[in-house]
Each structure stands twice: as structure tokens, then as C-alpha cells.
Image: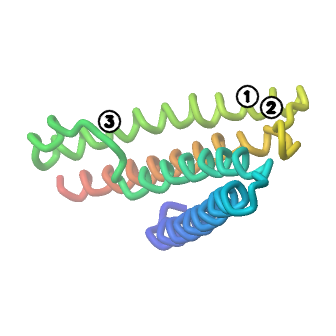
Amino acid sequence: MFSIQAKSKLDAVIAHLLVILMALMVLNVTWQVTSRYVFQSPSSFTDELSRYMLIWVGMLGSAYVAGKNEHLAVDILLTKLKGKAQQKLMILINVCVLVFAVTAMMIGGSNLVYITFILGQKSATLQIPLAYVYGIIPFSGILVTYYQAYSIVHLTQTLKTAE
């Protein structure tokens, strides 16, 4: 479950998905600009679609960088520590991120998806259920949780072998 091969495959899938989403977003915005300024007839769906794709890219991107351990961090204390103390602090940081991912992203995101699905809220122009748009939040939470659990297991194993 926490093998390096599984994590590498997951990283590759997410990276490819992010590239595809970004390419689609570039095409979408290019069409938006072209239809507005060249054809003098702005496309009605492109603004909303680019907004929703940006949400997806942002959430998937945050999960991806969490898996690479390259997310934004204040690391003043972490860089001052060495050895076991640094690894223990990394475990604590990963536990904090994991708790956030479970409570805010997975539980809170699932509640948001559920409420928008039950209320039948749809996007203004595309008329797609907003639950589909917001579904990326709990999905990204699952990914972040996996990555943080992977990191905790790896750091714990490293600490045990160092003793």
C-alpha cells in the first residue's frame, strides 16, 4: 500500500492529469480571447469553464506538491534541527497536514459535495451540477492523506532503523 512504486505511479497519473487540465485550460482561454476579439462574439461558457478548471488544477496541484513534499512551509525550525529531532518534527508536521486533509478536505469537502448535490445546485452557464466541480476537494483530500501517511510511515521506519 505504501510502496515507492505505488507512490511513483500515483505521482505520474496526477502529473499527467495536471498537464492535460492545464492544456485544456489554455485552449479554453485561447478560444475565449479569440471569440471575443477576433469574432466579436464572446463565448458564453469559457469564463465559467476556466474558473472550474482552475479549481481542479489548484486542488490537484496542491495534492501533488504535498506528495513531493514541496508545499509552502515555514521551515525555520526544521532547518535548524538535525538528525532524529528533524525527523520527529517532520512526522509532527505530516500529522498536522494529515489531520487538516481529513477534517477540512475530506469531511468538509464531502459535506459540501453532498449539500450541493442534494440541493441540485447547477452552474449558471454550463448547467452542470456543482457537486461535480466540488468533488475535487474530497478527492484531493484523499490524495493528501495518502501522501502524508506514506511520509509518516517512511519517516517512522527511518527513525527505527537509525536506533
Q: Which residue is drawn at 23% across and 46% down?
A: 87
Residue denoted by label 2: 114
Q: Distance between the residues labelled 2 and 1?
A: 5 Å
| Mark seen at residue 92 | 3
Residue at position x 81%, y 26% from top?
Answer: 115
- Nearer to the camera, 157 or 108: 108
Q: Nearer the viewer, mark 3 or mark 2?
A: 2
Q: Residue 111 carries which label?
A: 1
Disc 1 + disc 3, Cβ < 8 Å: no
The location of residue 24, given as percent across then percent down, is: 65, 65
Above or below, 7 relative to 86: below
Relative to 72, say whether 22 is above or below: below
Q: Tags 2 and 1 in contact by the CB under 8 Å rule?
A: yes
- Return the disc, 1 or 3, that comes first in the chain's sequence: 3
- Give the camera-side residue of 133 and 4: 133
Quarter of the image where the N terminus is located: bottom right
Q: Residue visible at 73% across and 29% down?
A: 112
Q: Do the residues labelled 3 and 2 touch (CB within 8 Å)?
A: no
Amino acid carrying label 3: it is Leu
State the separation of the CA atoms marked 3 and 2.
31 Å
What is the secondary structure assignment of the residue under circle 3? Answer: helix
Lateral position of residue 42 relative to residue 137, left or right? right
Q: How crowded is mark 2: few (under 14 residues within 10 Å), some or many (20 or more)?
A: some
Counting from the top left corner in percent of width and height, residue 35 is at: 73, 59
- Secondary structure at badge 2 equals helix
